[in-house]
Each structure stands twice: as C-alpha cells, then as structure tokens.
Image (tube, coloured by chain):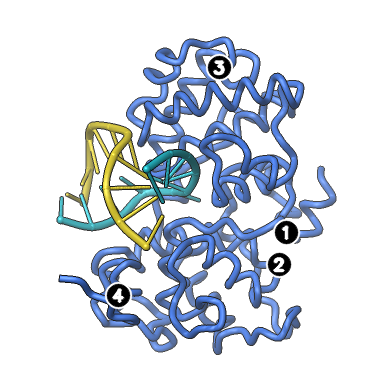
Chain colours: A blue, B cyan, C yellow
Amino acid sequence: MSLSLLRHTPYLTSAVPLPIQYFFISLTKMPKTRLSTMRQDSVQPPANWERVIEGIRRMRSSEHAPVDSIDPDEGVTSLQPKERRFAVLVGSLLSSQTKGHVTHEANQRLLENGLLSADSMNKADEVTIKSLIYPVGFYTRKARHLKQVAKICVSKYDGDIPGTVDELLLLPGVGPKIAHLVMIMAWNKVEGICVDTHVHRVSNRLGWVSQPGKKQGTRSPEETRVSLQQWLPKEEWVSINLLLVGFGQTICTPLRPRCAKCTVSEFCPSAFKEISSPASTSRTLSPKKKH
DNA sequence: TTCCTGTTCA
DNA sequence: TGAACCGGAA
C-alpha cells in the first residue's frame, strides 16, 4: 500500500480496496470536513465553503448518482502494476465526453481482447481498437491516440506510463483533466485537482472560483483548477471531484438545475437563477453579446 | 436542443 | 477563443 496515498487521502485507509480507479470511493468513507485548516497564500476561501461541502456530502449520500454505480476496478485489479497503470490511462482517455458505463464497457472489451497493455495495444490494428471502443465519444480520434500513446509507452517508458503531469501532458489525447486523474489513480499522487465539466460548472455557480485579479467566474476548467487550488485544503483535492461530479449529475445539472432540492442553495449566489450552462454564466456576468 | 467526468488545432 | 470530433440519450 502506498504511503503517498495515505498521506494525501487519509480517508482511504480502510475498507476501500487499493488501488482505486476513477475515484471510486465509497460515499460512506468520505471524510468530514476539517475545520480550521489553514491554507497557503493569502487567498481567502469563500464564505461557508465547509458548510456547503458538508451539505453536498449529505445530498450525495441520500441520492444515488450515475458515477456511484461504476466499479472501474472490475477485472483490472488482477493485472500487474504496469498493466494496471496503463489500463487506468486508457480508461481515462476513453472517458471524455462519454458516460461512465459506456467507458467501462469499452474498457472491458479491450481487457477481454487482451489489449490493456502498452505492448499489445501497440501491436493492435487501429481499426480493431476503434471497433472495440465504439460507441465511446470521439472513438475514431481516440483509437488513433491510443495507438500513439501505446507506442510512446513502449519506446520511452518500457511499457509503463509517464509518472509526472508534464510527461503525461505530452501524450496525444491527454490534457489537464486526464493528467491529474491519472496521477491520482495510477500513481497515487495528488499533483492537482481533477477538474472536469462538473467541477468547473458547480464551482462557478457556487462562486468558489474567479479569473486572476477579477471577480468574474472562470472560463475554462484549467482556470478553475488553479483558482480552486489556491484556497481548497489539499486534503480535499481528491474527494472534491467525485463529490461534485455526482452532485452535478443529479442536482446541480447543466440544464435546469434542481435548486429546490438543493440543501445549500442559501449559500449559492446562482440559486434559482435559471442558469443553463457555464457559457451562459460567463455571459451573464460579463455581457459581451454579439448579435 | 443539449449533454456526456475533454483535447486538439486553427 | 472557438469549431471539430462522435452518436446515443434525455
């Protein structure tokens, strides 16, 4: 068991089989918010953020979210460490703009066909990969990326995957979201927050993040990641993803958020304002319309 | 229509 | 900064 994982995610110390993937963390194991955790820098945390997180945790416990029903470890824990890390990378690559169960089924098909290793993936036909991962989003592009990634892993990393964020970002198809996800899931290292569309949207609605030197909300997930990391205690960096993804899937939805069912709406500056998307959020805050 | 745990290229 | 990549689902 990795010490680094325990250090960064103390709530994973029991009952949860390691290594975990895709942030599959039992909700009952989610930590209570730590009070009085002083943060670095001079950035003031948003008011009541701890109460908001606690409230969202309660909502997440009482209402099931799609992200909770996926066990990404299925069939993968039996793999050797090197293959398991590669499988994590592949699963992460497949996940963009794709629902969890679709991603999971595609990964299982790759596993059944023995393609979840850098060596076998490198030798596989691109058309074969494409047909196996269908109907994952952007499957044509991803099949190409997977072959390129496998080739790089074989030639430069002896069949393993890169161990740093910077090196992961050099892989085709790997951006900030996937790089930070893979660092946590494959290497048990927390280099940054994994910010996807849900974390980006919910953070902005709550008024938790802003552009550098401005009061306006962030315009990209990467801006959100930097802004969040300036005040959110590192102990929360891992759990915040699954927390807000599930919350974003069920209550704080992109379209027609269910503010009436949300128990933290009193702390939310966007509550009951009929927000339809992050894009419209920034438009509302800074009207730069064109006609 | 918009969304789905984004990244790439103009 | 925005369009393109993908197609099924709500």
Q: Decide which of tag 3 and tag 4 comes sooner along the chain.
A: 3
Chain under numbered label 3: A
Left or right: residue A103 versus residue A120 is: left
Q: Could you tell me which secondary element the residue under label 4 belongs to?
A: helix
Residue placed at 65% from the left, 25% from the top?
Answer: A152
How far apart are the alpha carbons under marks 2 and 4?
33 Å
* Picture quarter with the C terminus of chain A: bottom left
Q: Decide which of tag 1 and tag 3 comes sooner along the chain.
A: 1
Residue placed at 51% from the left, 76% from the top?
Answer: A211
The residue carrying pointer 3 sits among few (fewer than 14), some (14 to 19) or many (20 or more) residues within 10 Å by Cα, namely: many
Q: Which residue is mark 2?
A: A235
Residue placed at 46% from the left, 58% from the top?
Answer: A245
Q: Quadrant of residue A258?
A: bottom left
Work out whether disc 1 and disc 3 sit on a shared chain: yes
| Label 2 with label 4: CB-CB less than 8 Å | no
What residue type is disc 1 on? Answer: Thr
Compared to residue A198, the image places residue A120 above or below, namely above
Q: As rendered, which of A174 and A84 lies closer to the eye?
A: A174
Q: Could you tell me which secondary element the residue under label 3 belongs to?
A: loop
Q: Quadrant of residue A271?
A: bottom left
How far apart are the alpha carbons under marks 3 and 2?
35 Å
Q: Which residue is mark 3?
A: A115
| Label 1 with label 4: CB-CB less than 8 Å | no
The residue carrying pointer 1 sits among few (fewer than 14), some (14 to 19) or many (20 or more) residues within 10 Å by Cα, namely: many
The residue carrying pointer 2 sits among few (fewer than 14), some (14 to 19) or many (20 or more) residues within 10 Å by Cα, namely: some
Chain under numbered label 1: A
The residue carrying pointer 4 sits among few (fewer than 14), some (14 to 19) or many (20 or more) residues within 10 Å by Cα, namely: few
Please state the horizontal and vertical placement of residue A235, each as a whole percent of the image.
71, 67
| Label 2 with label 1: CB-CB less than 8 Å | yes
Q: Which residue is mark 1?
A: A9
Q: Could you tell me which secondary element the residue under label 2 belongs to?
A: helix
Q: Which residue is mark 4?
A: A283
